[in-house]
Image (cartoon, rainbow, N blue to C red):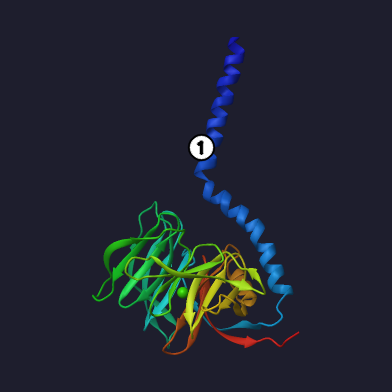
Amino acid sequence: MSARSQRRLTIAALLAAILCIAAYAFRDHVSYLWMQSVTVPRMNSLFAVQTDGVDIFEARVVRRIAHNRKHFVQGLQFDGDILWEGTGLYGQSKLIKYRFDRAAGILEPVYETALPAHIFGEGLAVLKGILYQLTWKKGHVYQYDLSGTQPLPLTPLSNDREGWGLTTDGQHLIASDGSAFLTFRSITDFYVTHAIEVQFQGKAIDRLNELEWIDGKVWANVWMTPFIVVVDPATGNVASIVDCRTLVEDAKASDPDIDVLNGIAWNVRNRELYLTGKLWPWIYQVVLDKKPSP
Ligand SMILES: [Ca+2]
């Protein structure tokens, strides 16, 4: 082989190595863009056209609660007057505790802890004095004892799937993993007790993300859409759909760089609904207006 051929071979090998390293380093971003390109048009067209037989509600803004626009919201849940928020992104994932001044509409951060830089935080839920926080791909389910003045970390549990959203029916934890399945989990070891497939008019609805248990139903953000599905936990069937396009437009008008709708918190004591998204400058208190049947 000539010296020139050897140089070409070396350069080609180096380029291939650089491409492989870049593809590995940005694998999550590539996967994210691919899922976005496939999911968004399909979900939007599905919900826009085929809504026979389910109730459609439109989320209407009651008030805006100021929120840190750097928070990539992955989990949101009230515990009395406390609002818990879990955020994602590598190097930026946190668990945040707010005291909510409901009359003034102000969230006062009273505790914050950062997750390790290699951990991407996901959904959270509070059940029987323990806060559970998922991680995206590492399989950790962080646990915190909430009986003291500050959360006390306990030994993490293990998740056998990707962690996306989390909520509770009061007995189980209920988790989403990016698929159309919601898994019901034991609070002691996070093992699956049973699962349901979420379906809308016979079609599986995947990319289920942040969750909330409200009045016996599981509410789920559908990732990359402005819609929330309200799911019957016994059958998996979508009972109604909440159209949040007005909120997305309002948030986008405040900040064009916002990410998707993601974050549902039900203030059970006052029966108030709060919604937000990733990198949104607001948490919205909303009421639902039922849309007339077409
Ligand atoms: Ca929630």
Q: Residue at x 47, y 72 (%)?
A: 67
Q: Is residue 82 visible?
A: yes
Can residue 66 be seen in this snapshot?
no
Could you say whether the residue bearing mark 1 is in a helix, strand or loop? helix
Q: Quadrant of residue 249?
A: bottom right
Residue 156 spot, x, y in % from top left: 31, 61
* Residue matched to label 1: 21
Identify the residue at image location x=58%, y=75%.
228
Amino acid type at mark 1: Ile
In the displayed structure, 61 sits above or below 118; it is below
Q: Say if 4 sits above or below 100 in the image.
A: above
Residue 16, x across and y down, in percent = 57, 31
294 sits left or right of 22 in the view? right
Is the residue 117 above or below the residue 257 in the image? above
Please indicate whether residue 6 sits to the left or right of residue 152 in the image: right
Residue at 25% in and 76% down: 147
- Left or right, 14 with respect to 139, comes to right
In-image side of 236 versus 167 (left or right): right
Q: Residue at x 52, y 50 (%)?
A: 28
Specify the quadrant of the image occupied by residue 47. Answer: bottom right
Q: Residue furthest left?
A: 148
**110, 242: nearer the viewer:** 242
Question: How many numbered marks have been drawn onto this rendered protein structure?
Answer: 1
